[in-house]
């Protein structure tokens, strides 16, 4: 059996109004209802909670200790509801694009500036969320930039560009003296990977030449370990653009396929700006 008291927002607003206004008459005026309606609403709240919330005399109304605690909770709930309403109302005047590691690489700044010029009415926010959907499934963004295909049919995606695959290694590593490397050069190394969001897996190598692996879940940790020379990494070129790091060198992997950059959004609830974002990102990647 559900024993939860039947408390609604109307009752909470009524309680807060009575306390703030100091009485039923003024609360009724603020709420735009009759004094009798205020009395009934307060009585139903007290009955539902099973406690006395207000002390009433012929002259004043004061909250009980319990009433003060309930009112404090009521203010928080009402504030959250107001924030929710504002969020829903302003949803189409703000655009949140999630990414896991490196946003749009060298195109990031150009995208932000051109968006501001073309769509000043829609505020752009780039949000870093290290998850498989870069925050989309978690509700942290309206669309996301990812560099691996998503099998989840709830999402629609389009490839907007391609990026080279680079090797990241310690700046004093002998391989850093080369202009480029091959997969075979790394097969005897320890490869640092992020299985949740990364584009690199041991399956890129032949079965008899796969490197050992260690896992990380953060780009800063990834770079810190690589700089020590203990491991090497492989990543899309956007990481090198976004995270140049003293002690870390990036070199192209010349026998690797490029990494596809995808824009992803909810299939049944696309943001109105989706097409505009697609067109701008595609144009930026074509410029190279």
Image: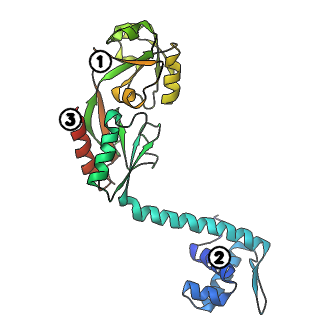
Of residues 88 and 5, which is closer to you in this image?
88
Q: Mark 1, residues whose alpha carbon is within 10 Å: few (<14), some, or many (≥20)?
A: some
Q: Secondary structure at mark 3?
A: helix
The residue at which mark 1 appears reads as 256
Q: CA distance from mark 1 to mark 3?
A: 20 Å
Q: Secondary structure at mark 1?
A: loop
- Please identify, in this view, whether the residue under mark 3 or under mark 2 is nearer the observer: 3
Q: In terms of sequence position, does the residue under pointer 3 or pointer 2 come before the other?
A: 2
The residue at which mark 2 appears reads as 16
Q: Is residue 225 left or right of residue 50?
A: left
Q: CA distance from mark 2 to mark 1?
A: 64 Å
Where is residue 215? Give x, y as percent. 51, 23
Of residues 73 and 121, which is closer to you in this image?
121
Q: Where the N terminus falls, by quadrant?
A: bottom right
Quadrant for residue 65, please give it: bottom right
Q: Which mark is residue 286?
A: 3
Q: Is residue 273 left or right of residue 47?
A: left
Where is residue 55? Give x, y as percent. 78, 82
Q: Mark 3, residues whose alpha carbon is within 10 Å: few (<14), some, or many (≥20)?
A: few
Q: Mark 2, residues whose alpha carbon is within 10 Å: few (<14), some, or many (≥20)?
A: many
- Please identify, in this view, whether the residue under mark 1 or under mark 3 is nearer the observer: 3
Q: In terms of sequence position, does the residue under pointer 2 or pointer 1 come before the other?
A: 2
Do the numbered discs 1 and 3 sit on residues whose CB atoms are within 8 Å? Answer: no
């Amino acid at each position: 059996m559900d024993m939860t008291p039947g408390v609604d927002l109307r009752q909470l607003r009524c309680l807060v109004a009575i306390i703030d206004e100091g009485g039923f008459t003024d609360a009724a005026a603020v709420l735009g209802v009759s004094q009798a309606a205020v009395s009934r609403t307060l009585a139903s709240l007290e009955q539902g909670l099973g406690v006395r919330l207000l002390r009433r005399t012929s002259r004043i109304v004061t909250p009980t200790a319990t009433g003060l605690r309930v009112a404090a909770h009521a203010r928080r709930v009402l504030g959250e509801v107001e924030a929710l309403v504002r969020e829903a109302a302003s949803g189409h005047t703000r655009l949140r694009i999630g990414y896991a590691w490196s946003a749009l690489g060298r195109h990031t700044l150009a995208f932000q500036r051109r968006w501001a010029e073309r769509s000043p009415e829609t505020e752009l926010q780039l949000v870093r969320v290290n998850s498989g959907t870069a925050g989309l499934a978690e509700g942290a963004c309206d669309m996301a930039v990812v560099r691996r295909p998503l099998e989840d049919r709830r999402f629609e995606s389009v490839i907007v560009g391609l990026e080279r695959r680079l090797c990241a290694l310690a700046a004093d590593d002998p391989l850093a003296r080369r202009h480029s490397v091959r997969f075979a050069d790394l097969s005897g190394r320890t490869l640092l990977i992020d299985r949740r969001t990364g584009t690199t897996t041991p399956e890129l190598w032949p079965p008899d030449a796969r490197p050992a692996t260690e896992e990380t879940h953060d780009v800063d940790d990834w770079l810190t370990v690589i700089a020590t020379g203990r491991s090497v990494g492989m990543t899309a070129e956007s990481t090198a653009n976004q995270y140049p790091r003293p002690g870390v060198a990036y070199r192209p992997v010349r026998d690797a396929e490029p990494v596809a950059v995808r824009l992803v959004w909810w299939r049944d609830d696309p943001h109105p700006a989706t097409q505009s974002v697609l067109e701008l990102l595609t144009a930026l990647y074509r410029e190279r």
